Image (cartoon, rainbow, N blue to C red):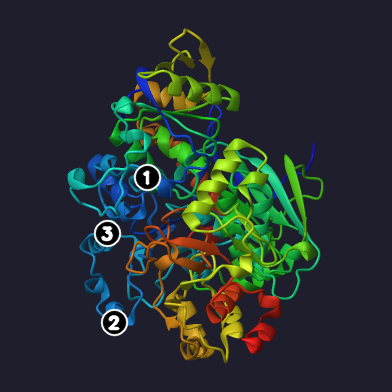
């Protein structure tokens, strides 16, 4: 996993509540058996004016000029500013794969759906929950200032605005550690191999019917 | 010290280790796999040189991409015309074969939607932890199994370690008390709950559904309710064990037998919340007030009773809600204050992991019997949840009722719930659907989904527009 320590990035605003994972990456793109290449189809139904197909060359597709990521001022954005319940719906990890492949490393919103929250951190994306009021103000500032950037410091758990204002955020210690170090959590879990074996032995003795080959 | 909730009990029974940083290692008893969210996980195992920790915990079946016409299915995988879908299904077959994981392949009589297959085979048992790379894994909570959807990284993590890294959720109880009216089903109950608490109302919680109306539901109905917990934001939905649970599981293929069955049943009887357990949040609904539900918008919380109307954005309480309603009405092609019964349909879909079990098909057939699908309906299809459901329905003659009424009777799979196969809506088409999500584009690019119960879907197919299934016969005679 790619490490995340600190990012000074351009902010793109997606002013819409309950952005679901079908919207982030529509189902036809889930047929891929790879982890990469989803970025060109991120927000496909909002971004293009036609229906996209997997494997299609997107260079000839008509863009929706009204969609935020198609506007020149937001090209190269790496921080997505969003509304409440971002990432609701399906468990498809293709959603964070698409966000990361596009170039987003941070999403800021008042709240995120649970499964998406898990999936994003496992792909090097930092999700930051700020209050509704703070998010409202960031939307206003982004709209008013072309080239608006934020400085995100994971170690200090702070977002710093261009005017120097500091917004603090919470992130649990384990996720923070994995992001800062770029750690694969399977490796971490396997350090507890003995504990898993011991648990399994006891579990099998207590509830043998849970094991098909008991 | 207060008693434990059902969720607390299941959590502590599977706790391998608690870490200082607040995360925990949780042991996973059952891992269900399908073709969409597993290929990258198997690839990850291979790249790291890892093997599955415990083969017998895993069970796989292809469901999302499989075609549903008999003609295509007769050819097995070769009948999948979309080459990208074919590769995905073939990859599941290859991975299961090379790693030694049991799989019900495309034309195995036990194949079906993973959340229908698990319970009907007894692969889902009370007291288990059940995970799958699919958010509707919440379904299995109907058996008092701690079940939730996971992403592909977690699929790989479970394969490699038999564990998940987790944080304990908060406890919510949703009580539905009283008796449901005639024609009001589990689907209406859960849509009404989502309408009440909202699509993020359960975020961070495990929801236990309780109360006399929930107790009165069959296992099929309970699965419908738990299935849609995720549509209220909760990864986990749970229902306590009772006689209904135990009667359903007896003699299922993977259920224990003999002495082990007796021991298991004794253990399962404890899988209820203690009388003095404390919930972080309690929501109560009066069953008698729930009418058949229809969603009008692009989020499952955008739902109302059949007697209701589409909301007017002008009445919204805040800007975000107003923008959301306005955008939804535009996408759905509906007008403010339009009556729900005035919404005309183009297609009808009866199926999905929410509503494709035998009881769902019986309910729809009961309404459809002796009637004809309206001429204005371009396609009305019934897609059984599994080969087992399909066979049982055919033994009961339900297929004939549907076919005689003008419905298409299909082969099992996820089908038009998410349109990864050829079954999809065209742009602008309105669909009465027994599935779980009405998101933009979910059932096809530009498609307009209305979530309803199987009985309501069947009635809408015959009338050509939404009707109150409670007064359905009378209306049909007038027509």
Q: Position of residue A134 (x, y in %)?
A: 56, 22
From the viewer's perspective, tell me whether residue A188 is left or right of residue B73. Answer: right
Q: Is residue B359 visible?
A: no
Residue drawn 61% across the image and 39% down it: B169
Q: For marks 3 and 1, give the one nearer the viewer.
A: 1
Give the CA distance from mark 2 to mark 3: 20 Å
SS class, disc 2? helix
From the viewer's perspective, tell me whether residue B445 is left or right of residue A57. Answer: right
The disc label shown at residue B71, or none: 2
Image quarter in which the N terminus of chain B is found: top right
Same-chain status of marks 2 and 3:
yes
Choose the circle earlier in sequence order: 2 or 3: 2
SS class, disc 1? helix
Q: Is residue B311 visible?
A: yes
Residue drawn 20% across the image and 51% down it: A56
Residue ID for mark 3: B88
Question: As rendered, which of B157 and B350 lies closer to the eye?
Answer: B350
Above or below for B227 versus A14: below
Residue ID for mark 1: A46
């Amino acid at each position: 996993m790619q490490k995340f320590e600190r990012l000074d990035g351009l902010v793109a605003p997606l002013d819409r509540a309950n952005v679901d994972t079908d919207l982030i990456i529509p189902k036809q793109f889930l047929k891929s058996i790879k982890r990469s290449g989803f970025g060109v189809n991120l927000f496909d139904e909002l971004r293009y004016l036609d229906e996209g197909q997997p494997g299609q060359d997107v260079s000839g597709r008509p863009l929706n000029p009204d969609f935020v990521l198609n506007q020149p001022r937001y090209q190269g954005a790496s921080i997505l500013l969003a509304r409440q319940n971002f990432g609701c719906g399906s468990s498809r990890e293709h959603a964070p794969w698409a966000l990361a492949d596009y170039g987003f490393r941070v999403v800021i919103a008042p709240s995120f759906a649970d499964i998406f929250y898990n999936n994003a951190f496992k792909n090097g994306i930092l999700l930051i929950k700020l209050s509704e009021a703070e998010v409202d103000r960031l939307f206003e500032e982004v709209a008013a200032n072309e080239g608006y950037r934020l400085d995100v410091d994971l170690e200090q758990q702070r977002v710093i605005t261009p005017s120097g204002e500091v917004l603090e955020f919470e992130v649990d210690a384990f996720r923070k550690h994995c992001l800062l170090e770029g750690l694969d959590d399977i490796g971490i879990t396997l350090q507890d191999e003995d504990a898993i074996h011991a648990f399994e032995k006891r579990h099998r003795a207590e509830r043998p019917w849970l094991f098909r080959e008991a | 010290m207060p008693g434990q909730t059902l969720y607390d009990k299941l959590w502590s029974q599977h706790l391998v280790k608690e870490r200082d940083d607040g995360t925990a290692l949780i042991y996973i008893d059952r891992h269900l796999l399908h073709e969409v969210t597993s290929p990258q996980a198997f690839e990850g195992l291979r790249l790291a040189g890892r093997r599955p920790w415990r083969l017998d915990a895993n069970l796989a079946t292809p469901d999302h991409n499989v075609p549903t016409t008999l003609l295509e299915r007769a050819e097995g995988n070769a009948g999948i015309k979309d080459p990208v879908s074919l590769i995905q299904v073939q990859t599941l077959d290859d991975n299961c074969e090379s790693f030694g994981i049991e799989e019900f392949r495309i034309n195995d009589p036990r194949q079906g939607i993973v959340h229908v297959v698990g319970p009907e085979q007894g692969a889902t048992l009370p007291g288990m932890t059940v995970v799958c790379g699919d958010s509707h894994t919440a379904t299995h909570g109907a058996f008092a199994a701690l079940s939730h959807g996971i992403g592909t990284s977690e699929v790989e993590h479970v394969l490699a370690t038999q564990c998940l890294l987790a944080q304990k959720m908060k406890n919510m109880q949703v009580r539905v008390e009283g008796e449901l009216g005639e024609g009001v089903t589990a689907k209406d109950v859960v849509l009404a709950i989502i309408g009440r608490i909202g699509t993020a109302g359960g975020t961070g919680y495990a929801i236990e559904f309780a109360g006399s109306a929930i107790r009165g539901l069959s296992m099929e109905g309970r699965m419908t309710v738990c299935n849609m917990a995720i549509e209220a934001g909760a990864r986990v939905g749970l229902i306590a064990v009772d006689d209904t649970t135990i009667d359903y599981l007896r003699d299922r293929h993977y259920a224990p037998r003999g002495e082990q069955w007796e021991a298991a049943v004794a253990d399962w009887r404890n899988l209820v919340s203690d009388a003095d357990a404390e919930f972080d949040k309690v929501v109560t609904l009066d069953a008698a007030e729930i009418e058949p539900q229809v969603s009008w918008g692009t989020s499952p919380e955008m739902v109302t009773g059949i007697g209701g109307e589409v909301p007017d954005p002008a009445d919204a309480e805040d800007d975000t809600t107003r923008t959301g309603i306005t955008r939804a009405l535009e996408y759905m092609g509906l007008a403010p204050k339009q009556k729900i019964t005035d919404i005309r349909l183009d297609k009808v879909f009866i199926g999905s992991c929410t509503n494709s079990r035998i009881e769902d098909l019986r309910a729809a057939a009961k309404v459809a019997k002796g009637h004809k699908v309206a001429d204005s309906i371009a396609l009305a299809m019934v897609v059984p949840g599994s080969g087992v459901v399909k066979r049982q329905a055919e033994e009961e003659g339900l297929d004939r009722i549907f076919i005689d009424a003008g419905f298409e009777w299909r082969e099992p799979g996820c089908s038009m719930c998410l349109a990864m196969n050829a079954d999809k809506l065209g742009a602008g088409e309105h669909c009465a659907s027994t599935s779980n999500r009405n998101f933009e584009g979910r059932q096809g690019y530009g498609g307009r989904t209305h979530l309803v119960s199987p009985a309501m879907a069947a009635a809408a197919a015959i009338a050509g527009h939404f009707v109150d299934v409670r007064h359905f016969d009378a209306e049909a005679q007038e027509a």
